[in-house]
Image (cartoon, grey):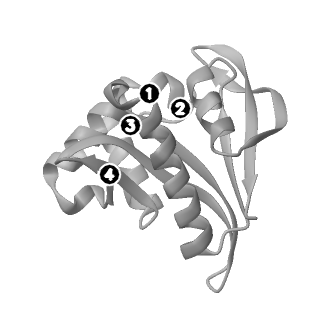
Amino acid sequence: MAEFRDPFDSPAFFEQALFLYTKYLKYLEDDYALNGLTVYDYFYNLVQRTAPFFFVIVERDTVSGFVYLDNIIGNCNMFHSAELTTCFDRRFWGDYTKECAKFFINYCFENYGLKKIKALVYPDNNRVKTLLKKSGFVKEALLKNETLRNGKLQDIEIYSVFKK
């Protein structure tokens, strides 16, 4: 079974997660994200900024993916909602990603007291949208021309799941 670990537990974990991030960057970020930083520096800052809510997903000492929470709403006593971002190596797509997603969502509801988890997805990212739907997320909104991606106006869809 997969383990959720801190990316700084091992230099290899961090490097493997960075490799995945670089590989799938076009599905994860818009044109404004890096803001002049190298991919390494941006990713390192992202992990630092979202800690302790950034996890690598490890299967037999290999990083199969990563997941993190960002833009948390609440205060130091109680969290209300957060944005979820996830990325898996293609070798692990399928039932494995579904099981990891369900585990992590339940973990967030139980351990962080979240009431809502949302995910912002580019409309062309059908694989993630399918994973979200199978994990109980529903489409909540479409933000038209929300950002720039590859120099073109880009819509963003918002999917959410609520604690039962």
Position of residue 128 relative to residue 113, above or below, is: above
* Label 1 with label 2: CB-CB less than 8 Å: yes
- Residue 80: name its quadrant: bottom right
Q: Residue at x 46, y 35 (%)?
A: 95
Reading the image, the residue beneath label 1 is 25
User: Is label 1 in a helix, a strand or a loop?
Assistant: helix
**Label 1 crowd bin: few (<14), some (14–19), many (20+), radius 10 Å:** some
The amino acid marked with disc number 4 is: Ala
Reading the image, the residue beneath label 2 is 29
- Residue 79: name its quadrant: bottom right
Nearest-to-viewer mark from 2 and 4? 4
Q: Would you say residue 115 is visible in this rendering?
A: yes
Reading the image, the residue beneath label 3 is 37
Dot 3 or dot 1: first in sequence order is 1
Image spot of residue 43 (x, y percent): 37, 44
Position of residue 128 relative to residue 101, above or below, is: above
Dot 3 or dot 4: first in sequence order is 4
User: In the rendered view, does 19 fall on the left or right side of 139?
Assistant: left
Kindly report the distance in space between the C-alpha atoms of the residues bearing marks 1 and 4: 23 Å
Reading the image, the residue beneath label 4 is 2
